[in-house]
């Protein structure tokens, strides 16, 4: 159990997508620990994107509230344009503002390229690339309108790319292509939105989650209980919460 305190994110309102498990959960908890009010978005899907439920997001919200923080759960589909708009509206309605979007939601359907199916390609690119676009697009429009109305804006977009998006990954053509697209999307967001007081950055995290636990199984077998867990998602989250202006 952590304790929510006044920290570097005190007073900030942050949306975290895919925040029910893994990296997203760690991000949400760290942001709350640093004083942010968090919108915990998650569909509760399986690793391949099938199924769904409100359980994971609700559990993270309960943990944040039990520690004295503020959070709400949201189950909208980030890759649905109208759903992404509802997600942004939920933050504004619940907390009266929005200061950052952490795009983290995603899943994998690994397949060698010659065997890749159209529906698998579409599903992976949709949740990763369109999901990053849709939520940030609605947030950016809100921040632009604020700036044009004379309201100071100090906002952040944090995207999640991957080493697969930079170097490629065998058996993950759709995932790699989507993550590469996210990297270049971030460059465009930074160039266009800076005038409104919005920064955009992308992470290429290395952590043990449902997507990568098989990769790190042998490595973790060698780590004792008293040793530092280098692949824990919690090691990435302080970078997400860090504010260079504080």
Image (spheres, helix red, strand yellow):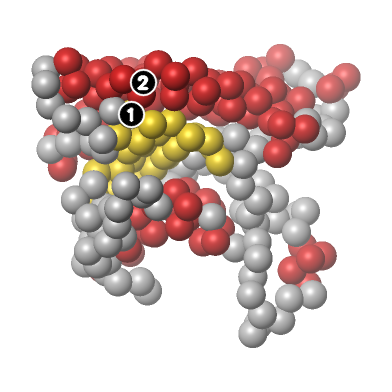
Residue 92 horizontal/vertical position (percent) = 18, 34
- Mark 2 and mark 1 in contact? Answer it, CB < 8 Å: yes
* Residue with the most extreme right position: 114
Which residue is identified by label 2?
193
Element under disc 1? strand
The residue at 71%/31% (across/down) is: 166
- In percent of the image, x 11 and y 21: which residue is there? 150
How many labels were placed on the picture?
2
Whole-percent x, y for residue 137 in the image: 37, 19
- Can the viewer see residue 28 in this picture? no
Coordinates of residue 56 in the picture (x, y in percent): 42, 52
Q: Give the residue pinned by disc 1.
A: 198
Quadrant of the drawing holding the N terminus: bottom left
State the separation of the CA atoms marked 2 and 1. Answer: 5 Å
Lateral position of residue 77 relative to residue 122, left or right: left
Mark 1 nearby-residue class (10 Å; few <14, some 14–19, many ≥20): many
Q: Quadrant of residue 145?
A: top left
Q: From where the camera sits, is residue 163 visible?
A: yes
Residue for point 72% across, 35% down = 164
């Amino acid at each position: 159990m952590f304790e929510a305190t006044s920290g570097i994110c005190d007073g900030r309102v942050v949306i975290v997508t895919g925040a029910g498990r893994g990296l997203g959960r760690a991000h949400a908890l760290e942001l709350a620990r640093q004083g942010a009010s968090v919108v915990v978005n998650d569909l509760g899907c399986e690793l391949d994107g099938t199924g769904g439920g409100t359980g994971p997001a609700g559990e993270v919200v309960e943990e944040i509230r039990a520690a004295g923080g503020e959070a709400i759960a949201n189950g909208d589909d980030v890759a649905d344009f109208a759903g992404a708009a509802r997600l942004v509206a939920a933050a504004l309605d619940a907390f009266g503002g929005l200061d950052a979007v952490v795009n983290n939601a995603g899943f994998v359907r690994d397949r060698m390229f010659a065997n890749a199916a159209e529906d698998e390609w579409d599903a992976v690119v949709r949740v990763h690339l369109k999901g990053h676009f849709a939520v940030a697009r609605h947030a950016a429009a809100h921040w632009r309108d604020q700036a044009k109305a004379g309201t100071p804006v100090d906002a952040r977009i944090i995207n999640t790319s991957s080493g697969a998006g930079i170097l490629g990954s065998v058996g993950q053509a759709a995932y790699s292509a989507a993550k590469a697209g996210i990297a270049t999307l971030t460059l465009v967001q930074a160039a266009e939105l800076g005038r409104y007081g919005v920064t955009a950055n992308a992470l290429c995290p290395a952590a043990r989650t449902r997507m990568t636990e098989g990769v790190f199984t042998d490595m973790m077998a060698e780590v004792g209980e008293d040793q530092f867990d280098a692949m824990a998602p919690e090691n990435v989250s302080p970078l997400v919460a860090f504010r260079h202006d504080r």
